[in-house]
Amino acid sequence: MSFCQRMKDDWRQAKFDSYLLIGLIFSIPFSTSLSSILSFLIFISWLLHADFRNDWNQFKSNRLVVASFLFLGLHVIGLLWTSDLMHGLMVLKKAWKFFMIPIFMLYVRKEHINYYIGSLILAMTISILISYGIWLEMIPPINRATINNPVPFGTHITYNVLLTVAVYLLARNLLFDMWTSVIQQGLYLLVLALMVVNMFITGGRSGQVMFFAAIGVLCFQYFGGQFFKAGAATIAVTLSILVVAYSFSGLFQQRLLEAISKRHISTQERIAYAKGGLKILYSHPLIGVGTGDLPAELKKFQPHQSPEFYGGNPHNMYVMAMVQFGSLGLASLLYIFYVQICHALGTQHVTLRQVGVAFPLLFLVVNFGESYLSVHATSLLFAVFSSFLYKDL
């Protein structure tokens, strides 16, 4: 085979894998199995066509890849001082998305950036339409959805996070991109309004907090260096949506009051996890308790009101990192977000710069409410979006 023919075949394969990435992003809100299969196909394609020396050179030259490997490496090394090796291996198994970031990066194509973004918006548009169908009793509930909490796919824990990312992307497009069609712009405004309303007829509180953070990010991006205007706009829009949502959504009102009064069992557990995590960090400040000992250690701080308490997931990514790997783990996790923001600020591509800054900021916020970088849908979305937002294109 000639050199030119080989280059042509490699280009076709890279383009095909880029389409797989588009399909992967589209599948994340709908199916854990399908998104895992598509990720596996991309991995197999890399193994079959890899130029390992050249790929390694690309990997080590990207700061985000290095940061991801550092965090993933702690999961491996942390098995050495864990007493529960089986649980440690289960935790390590969940961390495979960090390994896939550089492999996804190899197949990212600059001309497909809008497709990567658009595939998530389209997937969540379909999701909310089904959600409204359940809510309005036009279609029967599917999976674990109910009329009072119409989340058609996955759970409310991840649904509103994915929805918030879609809301931010759609709102950013409307605010900053040039539009030639009034009809198209009107359609996007309608979809955005439907997404925002859907945010408050479902019960994902962490995603709702992330949504209000997204409003702040959009306001500050829109007004640039005018901090007073950006702050005033953030407060005005946030309060307006809060008042309307509280007045018209019984589910939002109920879950907000539960969170404020600390009556809900999940709120009590989160407080117990946070306090317990800080005490464990004080006892094991540098390297934590290891990859697998988090459940046993956090169970020592079980709230008496919670006989069903399970410490395998502290519902806080920062607590998880510092219990497992101490200050090293927390610093390694925060370093990932730092690298992402620095890379985004240095790019000249407007979309990549704006989305690249917003993405880690939103995940920084939402990770206080759940360990979202260990939950399948959100951690896979984090990996795939990182692959095109922070690649040197």
Image (cartoon, rainbow, N blue to C red):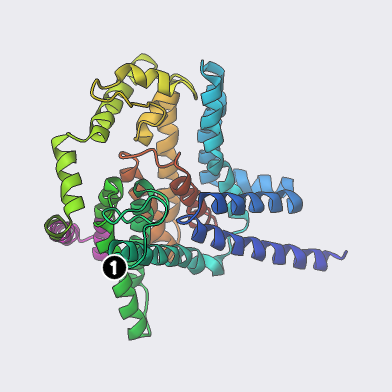
Return the x and y of residue 204 as percentages of the image width and height: 29, 48
Residue that badge 1 annotates: 194
Quarter location, residue 298: top left
Placement of 377 over or under 137, stated as above or below: above
Placement of 58 over or under 287, stated as above or below: below
Residue at horizontal 34 percent and vertical 44 percent from the top: 364
Quarter location, residue 227: bottom left
Return the x and y of residue 337 as percentages of the image width and height: 41, 44
The answer to whether residue 39 of the structure is visible from this angle is yes
Residue at horizontal 44 percent and vertical 63 percent from the top: 123
Residue at horizontal 29 percent and vertical 28 percent from the top: 274
Placement of 111 over or under 272, stated as above or below: below
Split into 4 quadrants, where in the image is the N terminus?
bottom right
Split into 4 quadrants, where in the image is the C terminus?
bottom right
The answer to whether residue 169 of the structure is visible from this angle is no
Residue at horizontal 33 percent and vertical 16 percent from the top: 300
* Bounds of the magenta segment: 215-241
**Number of marks present in the image shown:** 1
Return the x and y of residue 110 as percentages of the image width and height: 55, 66
